[in-house]
Image (cartoon, helix red, strand yellow):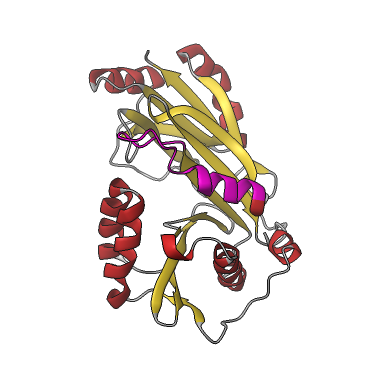
């Protein structure tokens, strides 16, 4: 991302009329208005998130008028990996390089906080009334303007006809820090959780073993993959996903394939340099 954005000829720093700054409680109504104008479900989710915390959320203003917002969420189980969150531009301010400028300012924040890799999740959701692919402009922006790499495409992830796209952007070079995933780690499956904003898609919950010098006691009961499948089937689920670090996934590969899971792709260098996240899926249809 550092190299990509610099090649666009953009420069950092606030101009005399355009300002990038942390979001405050006073900004929330104007920000929510922009998000709701884009998608009602996104607005409802943003309201819940903003009530909990405004940490790592930022706004862009022009002469005191709200232009847009962006932010990120750090995955604490990784070496300096973050996810882009709630990034929108007011319809009046789209174009004219405003999106580029906002992303460059966000990149400066990410670099200052030591973030090395930014992942971006979006979809191809169609408006129920008009059939418009409402995230197409965002995908075009990530792919064509930022030259983001599409790491993963999951068909029908959120709902039939609503797939998930995951892009990655380098902020800085990946450091050679020790991987947060021990080479001898294995997964202990403990349950399932429904994917947010999905129609009956579930993801497996798991704990990593061993933990440091021994196994950490857990209040959860270990479950087999067959039990997880049975549980999701009882909820009339469509799909069950398992996501694991590649070193852990390799140890469970035979077990996953035997249970009927398929390897559907990966997120490169997700946990640290050279340690990917592997995605598996089990479809009930």
Name the residue located 56 percent from the left edge and 72 percent from the top edge. 109
- Residue 161 visible in the current orientation: yes
| Residue extending farthest bottom | 16
Q: From the viewer's side, name the closer residue of 122 and 134.
A: 134
**Above or below 94: residue 207:** above
- What x and y, as percent, mark residue 19? 49, 80
Q: Is residue 156 left or right of residue 183?
A: left
Name the residue located 39 percent from the left edge and 25 percent from the top edge. 240
Give the position of the C terminus as an image quadrant: top left
**Above or below 128: residue 10:** below
Name the residue located 50 percent from the left edge and 52 percent from the top edge. 77
Q: From the viewer's side, name the closer residue of 174 and 21.
A: 21
Magenta region includes residue 126: yes
Q: Is residue 199 left or right of residue 113?
A: left
- Residue 213 visible in the current orientation: no
- What x and y, as percent, mark residue 195? 35, 37
- What x and y, as percent, mark residue 56? 44, 68
Q: Which residues make up the magenta segment?
A: 124-144
């Amino acid at each position: 991302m550092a190299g990509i954005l610099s090649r666009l000829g953009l420069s950092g720093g606030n101009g005399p009329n355009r300002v990038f700054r942390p979001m405050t409680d006073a900004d929330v109504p104007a920000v929510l208005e922009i998000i709701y104008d884009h998608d009602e479900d996104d607005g409802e989710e943003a309201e819940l998130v903003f009530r909990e915390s405004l940490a790592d959320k930022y706004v862009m203003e022009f002469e005191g008028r709200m232009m847009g917002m962006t932010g990120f969420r750090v995955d604490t189980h990784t070496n300096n990996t973050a996810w882009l969150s709630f990034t929108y531009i007011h319809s009046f301010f789209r174009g004219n390089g405003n999106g580029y400028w906002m992303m460059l300012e966000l990149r400066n924040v990410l670099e200052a906080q030591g973030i090395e890799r930014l992942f971006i999740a979006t979809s191809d959701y169609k408006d129920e009334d008009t059939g418009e692919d409402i995230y197409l402009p965002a995908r075009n922006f990530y792919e064509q303007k930022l030259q983001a790499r599409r790491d993963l495409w999951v068909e029908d992830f959120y709902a039939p006809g609503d797939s998930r796209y995951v892009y990655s952007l380098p902020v800085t070079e990946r450091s050679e820090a020790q991987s947060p995933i021990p080479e001898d780690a294995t997964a202990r499956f403990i349950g399932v959780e429904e994917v947010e904003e999905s129609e009956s898609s579930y993801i497996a919950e798991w704990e990593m073993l061993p933990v440091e010098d021994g196994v950490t006691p857990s209040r959860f009961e270990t479950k087999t993959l067959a039990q997880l499948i049975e549980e999701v089937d009882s909820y009339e689920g469509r799909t069950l996903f398992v996501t694991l670090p590649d070193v852990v996934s390799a140890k469970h590969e035979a077990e996953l394939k035997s249970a009927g899971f398929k390897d559907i792709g990966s997120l490169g260098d997700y946990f640290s340099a050279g340690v990917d996240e592997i995605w598996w899926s089990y479809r009930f249809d």
